[in-house]
Amino acid sequence: MPKKHHHNVYVVELSPEVLEHARFRKANPDYDAVKPCLYVGMTGLSPEKRFAKHKKGERANSFVERYGMRLLPKLYAYANPMPYQAAREMEVELAIALREEGYGVWQG
């Protein structure tokens, strides 16, 4: 029986206050201010469980812990679930693609 894939990419909308951080702004020189700021990550958990862990401070990205507002499944659900290596690659590719579209992106 083939192993079931259980890795996921996910996208979190960050509040605009994240733009107060110079390192976030520096990572997004072409940010379009009409679009939201995002965090892109990958996990072996469900996106919902991983987001909850970020918000509790468990293995959290500080931007998500402080500024994470909600998951945006319309930006990632089509791709999940997938094997580990595919999720690692998709995390990078999705972050690059969203940044190219003008989103402010921090990647996990």
Image: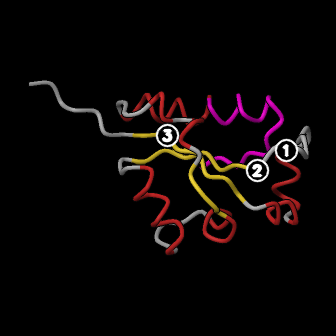
The disc labelled 3 sits on which kind of residue?
Val
Q: CA distance from mark 1 to mark 2?
A: 10 Å
Query: Helix or strand or loop: what does disc 2 sit on?
Result: strand
**Magenta stretch, residue numbers:** 94-108
The N terminus lies in quadrant:
top left
Q: Residue furthest bottom?
A: 56
Q: Residue at x 56, y 51 (%)?
A: 71
Give the residue at mark 1. 28
Q: Residues within 10 Å of mark 3 (few under 14, many from 20)?
A: many
The disc labelled 2 sits on which kind of residue?
Cys
> Is the C-beta separation of discs 1 and 2 under 8 Å?
yes
The mark lying in front, picked from 3 and 1, is 3
First of labels 1, 2 by sequence position:
1
Q: Residue at x 81, y 55 (%)?
A: 24
List x then y, in percent, for residue 32. 90, 40
List x then y, in percent, for residue 78. 48, 28
Give the residue at mark 3. 9
Q: Quadrant of residue 91?
A: top right
